[in-house]
Amino acid sequence: MELISVGKISGTHHLMGTLKVSSNFEDLSIIVGSKVVVKHTNGMSRILTVTNIKKLSPKRLAFDFEEITNKTEGIALSGYSIYIRKDILGLEEDEYYASDIIGMMAVTVDGEELGEITDLMETAGHDIYVIGKGKEEIMVPSVEEFVKDVDFKKRVVIFDLIEGMRP
């Protein structure tokens, strides 16, 4: 069972324990009624049941959980990330979200390490991967011409760069 992060809890929305969540997902209504895992970077985690999701702004949502009934309980979850089963989102086995690539190692088709993929920039045409190595960054469009393979087991993305893409 593979989990995918759908957002990060940034605080509470009101006294009843509704939580503000930053998310890049436009519509998460499909997870209302589902169990989710909330995890902190310190290793703490809980399983919660989503009862309602409201859109506050394009990248901010308000989540209600059955188990969170007041502001104090909600504040305790600030900084936690929300994870759901990837299959709930309807992705096929060979499909993935571009954000799944962040943190993976970028290498060329010749095996040269470019660095870690540190960010994803969304543009009107396509996403752009930001590969950071020290103070230098390489930006590569997420198109078949440049992205040759994604190996989730090895956590490696293989790129075929053209002249001028490197600093």
Image: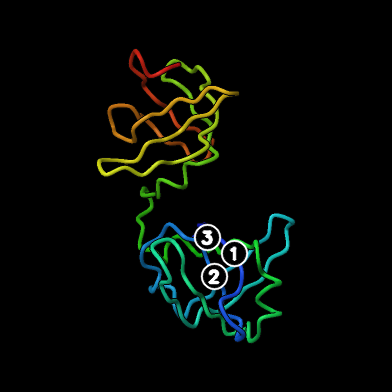
Foreground pick, 134 / 89 = 134
- Give the image location of residue 28, x and y in percent: 40, 69
Please name whichever residue, 99 or 93, is drawn nearer the observer in this view of the structure: 99
Q: What is the x, y in percent for residue 67?
A: 62, 83
Asked if labels 1 and 3 touch by Cβ distance under 8 angstroms, the answer is no
Q: Residue 20: which numbered mark, if any?
A: 2
**For this view, does 80 lie left or right of residue 106?**
right
Is the Cβ of the residue at disc 1 closer than 8 Å to that at disc 2? yes
Mark 3 or mark 1, earlier in chain: 3
Image height check: is 41 above or below 104? below
Q: Position of residue 107 (x, y in %)?
A: 48, 24
In the image: residue 91, left or right of residue 83:
left
Q: Position of residue 142 (x, y in %)?
A: 34, 36
Residue ID for mark 3: 1
Query: What amino acid is at disc 3?
Result: Met
Identify the residue shown where x is 65% and y is 85%: 70
Q: Name the residue under label 1.
A: 10
Q: 10 Å neighbourhood of mark 3: few (<14), some, or many (≥20)?
A: few
Left or right relative to 75: residue 98: left
Q: Is mark 3 on a helix, strand or loop?
A: loop
Element type at marker 2? strand
Q: Residue 119 carries which label?
A: none
Where 91 sits versus 160, above or below?
Answer: below
